[in-house]
Amino acid sequence: MKQSIGNIFKNLSNYLLIILLLSIFAISFIASDGLSFQKVKILNAQEKLVNDIMDLETIDLKTTMISFNAQSVELINKVSDLKDINQYDYINKFLLPKNAKEYEYDMAVLKNKIKIFNNKSNRFFSEYGKNSKKNSLNRKKMLDNYIALLNEIDLIKLHIQTNTMAKYYYFQKLAIIIFVLIIFVALWYRKKLNIIYEDILFLYNMNRITQKEHKIITDEVGTISLQMKRKPTSNNEKV
């Protein structure tokens, strides 16, 4: 049974389209990993801000409160940055929806713990020096919430790492599929294109005396060769 050149190129086009779509999907995994890196970077910045607040001096309370207000606002704003980045993590949204929900929950808990920490820190700095016993109590509450906040940041980092490992598993499988498809297309369609080339070469040499025997494989070339054989030559027309 002869093969159709049209079908060969149509199937080749479909395979190339599939490879293209899978490659775009693979690039989405790489982009998602980049976003995970950005999330961890922001969390590290938050951790530094928390430590900076804990290290604020109480000698000049006016300067301390200015620094604290700026750092506490930045601390809460970085939660918004984490949420904004996650909007572009389409792999999490569509492939790992459970992890996406977990991340949203983590952001809500993180924001709440930052608010509590800021509140306790503000109370410590604003009431500092009024009563030594109250100073110690406020400092202890600040320290307790400091530890709780750092623990939450570390937990979110762990969740991101686990999520990244899950995405890597899918990316690895996808990369293997793309590789196999590329090898298949390269080998299989190289053979098909050679067949088409040989058939076209046969048509080109069809009226030559030195033409070798050739078995036509493709439908279109078979049809054209029959038409060429039926067409009268210029010598026959003169006779």
Image (cartoon, rainbow, N blue to C red):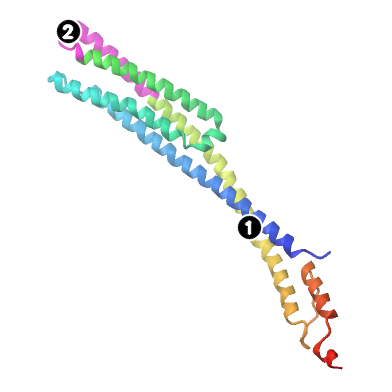
- The quarter of the picture where residue 193 lies is bottom right
Against 169, residue 151 (above or below) is above
Residue ranking furthest to the right = 239
Residue 55 visible here:
no
What's under tag 1, amino acid-wise? Ile
Q: In which quarter of the image is residue 66?
A: top left
Say few, some or many: other residues with alpha carbon within 10 Å of mark 1 (under 14 / 14 to 19 / 20 or more): few
Q: In this view, does 48 lie to the left or right of 163?
A: left
Front-most of 229 and 150?
229
Give the residues in magenta: 126-152
Residue 175: image x %, image y %? 57, 48
Amino acid carrying mark 2 in the image:
Ser
| CA separation in Å, label 1 and label 2 | 75 Å
**Mark seen at residue 132:** 2
Q: Is the magenta stretch mostly helix, strand or loop?
A: helix
Residue matched to label 1 = 183
